[in-house]
Image (cartoon, helix red, strand yellow):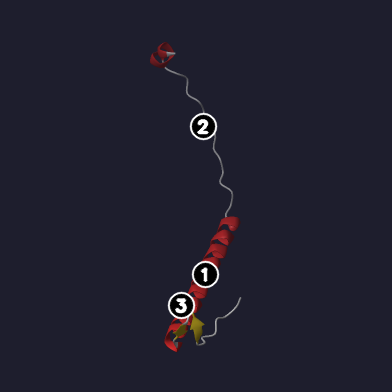
Amino acid sequence: MFSVVPQTGRENGRKISIIAACGYYTMMQASEKAIRILIEAQRQREEIYLNQKEPSLTLLPIKDAGPEEKQEK
């Protein structure tokens, strides 16, 4: 991971102010933090999913078709 250090410089012939650079730096830090939070939430959810017991299946008997259903076929 990398960090953006606020600096002044020129972009398209315009001087970038320190305030704009600091705002960009703050935005990048917040974006990186949000991504880390989402990744950790995904890891936790995957861990919960992997630790769940497999569901048990119950087979139900098939009922015979009544006289009305047999006539329709």
In the picture, the disc for residue 35 is 1
Q: Sequence-wise, which precedes: disc 2 or disc 1? A: 1
| Residue drawn at the location 42% of the way across and 87% of the way down | 19
Circle 2 residues within 10 Å: few <14, some 14–19, many ≥20: few
Between the C-alphas of marks 3 and 2, the distance is 57 Å
Residue 4 lies, with reference to residue 53, above or below; the image says below
Circle 1 residues within 10 Å: few <14, some 14–19, many ≥20: few
Q: Label 3 belongs to which residue? A: 27
Q: Could you tell me which secondary element the residue under label 2 belongs to?
A: loop
Between the C-alphas of marks 1 and 3, the distance is 12 Å
| Residue drawn at the location 49% of the way across and 73% of the way down | 31
| Residue drawn at the location 51% of the way across and 75% of the way down | 33
Farthest-out residue, front = 13
Between the C-alphas of marks 2 and 1, the distance is 46 Å
- Along the line of sight, the residue nearer the viewer: 56 or 10: 10
Q: Label 2 belongs to which residue? A: 60
Residue 40 located left or right of residue 18: right
Q: Residue 66 in the image: state x and y as whole percent.
A: 42, 17
Q: Quadrant of residue 49?
A: bottom right
